[in-house]
Image (cartoon, grey):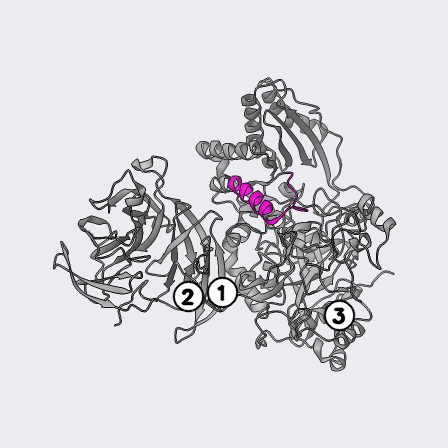
Amino acid sequence: MRFQLFPETFALFGVSWCINFGYEAIQLTDGDIDNFPAIAFGDTSDPIDFPACKAFPGTDEWPLENEWSQLNSSLGGALLKPVPLASVCYAGPLYDANKCRTLQNNPGRTYTNDPLTVLTEWPEGDTCPATSTPNVGSCTQGGFPVYVINATTVKQIQIGVNFARNKNIRLVIKNTGHEWTGRSSGAGSLSIWTHYLKSFEYLPQYSQAEYKGRAARVGAGLETWEMFNYMASNRMGVVVPAGTTTIGPYGGWMAGGGHSILTSSYGMGSDQPLSLQVVTADGRFVTADPSTNEDLFFAMRGGGGSTYGIVTSAIVKAYPPITVTRSSLQFTSANVSLQKFWEGINLYFFWGKLVTEDEGTAFSNVIRNSATSFSFNTNVEMPNKSIQEVFEFVQPFVDSIERLGITMDNPIPTNPSASFQTGTGQGDRPGNQRFGSRLFPRRNWEDETLWNQTMDAIKESVEAGYTFHGIHLSATEELAGYPGNNAVNPGFRNGLMHADSFDSFTIRGKNEHQVTEAHARQEIYMEKIRAVTPDGGAYLNEADVEEPNWQQSFFGTNYPRLLEIKSKRDPWGVFWASTTPGSEKWEVREIVLNNSVRVNVARLGTLATHWLAGNNVAKVYSLVAATAPPYAVYGTAFSAAGAQGNDSYGTAMSVDKDGFFTRVDQKFGYRPSSGIHGMALNRNNTFLYSADDTGNFVWTHSVDPSTGFVTFVDASPAPSNGSHGFYDTHPRHVTAHPEGKFLYTLFEESEQLAQFEIDQATGIPSFQGVAYSMVLPDTNTSDPSTGRYAAGVKLSSSNKYLCASFRGRQEDQAGSFAAFSLNPDGSIIKQLFLVPTLSSGGLSNIVSPNPITDKYVAITDESFGFVDIFALADDASKVSPVTRLSIPDGGCCADVLWAL
């Protein structure tokens, strides 16, 4: 059956939409809603408040069986209640040895066509792996959805979205399940399966605003191999993924950016749509294009899948038939020194820049075979080039490699072939590895020092056993062309390479400690790569779900706008997927362990209104409040007594007009190795600075003035490894001068107060060697146990003086207190005094200057519960105690604020 095109644009209830295929003409009506009110549309202007947690099987909120039956009737029987494929491998009524054997040995398209399976096992929460021992272990639904809608019409998708929203049920979206971060599965969820939205139509002549040329209408359920077949039969080309042919191009691949062998010639997958057909969180069916629902059109092209709506079809750019000539190159470290091998690797990665400049892409692997044996291979893909052209392009590189004494295997290019290969799309089976992702900026090729550091980081990673899969590509704004203005990670626009790092460690069968340890080891080497690519980022579609600072890594400067769109379009949180805009407002609670491996098998709930909800023994390391609307509050690190705090994350919270906490708005990451203790805002509330004690950095985040959300800018290193005469100094507390030119921090390890200069253009601080000792005479510098811990640093009321304190390590060791005079611009003139405090301070010894006069300063002691008040001389050259406020109730006095 061939669906007919409906060229009209319809307007209903203020919603504009077009349709590409007949299945989009079948939509939800008022009559359907009258018969089953649970599928009524939503209203984004007046969203209904729901409980903090999504409904979950077994809870009172979970719909009754008769409601699920009504839902199925409204769907025309499209509601499925599938069980995991491998249930046939376990003892019980579903056991079938032949089916189990087929599943393990020759699954064909079984996994691809399954409504549950996601092809990366560890984040999907699969508690039912295929096994040859049916009487060992158990098979449960685990992290898989409870119900699945096999959607073949827009109406069915609208019903699913509305029912999930109105019943407060977790909703997930799935096509083929090519997904690395668990977004297509979820315990206790309803899934919308778009796998069979498979229509296609070629448009030889298409016009839209300034675009005039070929185009194609594509259904969201089409797989790459199906697109190949349509390209062949219509003698045309469309940009689709490289490699695996069962990926669904114009769903999640496009939504996350989408790279391919054609990227350097035709742009990213997100650059291809001219319009999208979408079901939004309120259940409406809309068109998104450059002139209609522009916000959705921006966000859904690169801003993350399963987040803003469900794509049912797209109109995408098409091209004349595209051919690709490939040159496959490889060499090993055999018969050559390791030094020469790595020189060859260095040459290759630098040469890759030339590949992108000639509109090609190159897919390479550097592999550790053993401690003394390494191998390398690459496929250089050159669109629309002849064999001779590719040979002449590749040969100079081959010559340079051979001059090193390295033998290159088979450098002759293959015959040009179509960019597609027709076929039947034989399926894939689930994998179980974890990947680290990074985008490498163009400037790494332009700065010799940075280039050498980059290659050192890659080399260390490979030597540690991680395969480095590098893809040279270039996806500039100029190449993207019309319609432009999308949410593709800026790291792609400014980069020359995307790379994944992975090893042979598989998670299946490992316990929690083994998994955690393996990931921590991998992060050591990913951190080295991130350190040399601070302006890079990571590719959302091929990343680690625990990517630190993911908002910046995956979305860069687009994040604030994407978050605003998400909040406007989905105020209910109908669409939730890990590491997508707005996902930080929710958390998976009551984590369940499967063989001690953390999996996606728990209930989804909003983050607590603030950290201390339900925990009266929590510890907050730092809390700082903005002084202008929207008056956001920022903090880091809390833990139950005796437990380790999570000080590698920060949180932004909202307050109401009376200053009461209302909600958690954003959870933002630093690095897994970070230990954030101190935070400070600049005077204009435009930058948030964080002191990273264990990471040895001072972090800079920009602050969105309208929302209070933060975006990573930079991590400025504190002195280490002998620079400026220091070892690792460990900045612990921080404050900013209101003139915006200087930042002050306490170096805990070296027991100093340090001054950082702030770049006026970027807001980034850097240490220029100005630091003052706060070591008291009783300190034995050769015995670390006699040193002190950094406590606090704050400005006096006039900003003429800076006060700082350290606390004693034991109760009988006094802390230290110092004051410094400042120039009007905030630069330090000199240290005025350094004296011991009247106690150790316990875990605090925080210094708090009076906000009205420079004369008085308070210092706290939480061990015995008192606050000491000190008076400064008129010139602040000396200090004397005035009085003590004692509150020995067991809860005072970690910090103190002066009442005005």
**From the viewer's perspective, is residue 17 above or below residue 647?**
below
| Rendering quarter of residue 629 | bottom left
In this image, 734 relative to 60: left or right?
left
Q: Position of residue 125 (x, y in %)?
A: 67, 55
| Rendering quarter of residue 851 | bottom left
Contact, CB < 8 Å: mark 2 with mark 1? yes
**From the viewer's perspective, is residue 677 above or below residue 431?**
below
Q: Position of residue 239 (x, y in %)?
A: 70, 47
Which element is circle 2 on?
loop
Please tell me which residue lies in front, 514 or 241: 514
Give the class, few, some or many, for how many residues have Cα within 10 Å of label 1's Cα (few <14, many ≥20). many
What span is in magenta? 504-526
In this image, 392 relative to 884: left or right?
right
Q: Which residue is mark 3?
A: 155
Mark sitting on residue 632:
2
Mark sitting on residue 665:
1
Give the class, few, some or many, for how many residues have Cα within 10 Å of label 2's Cα (few <14, many ≥20). many
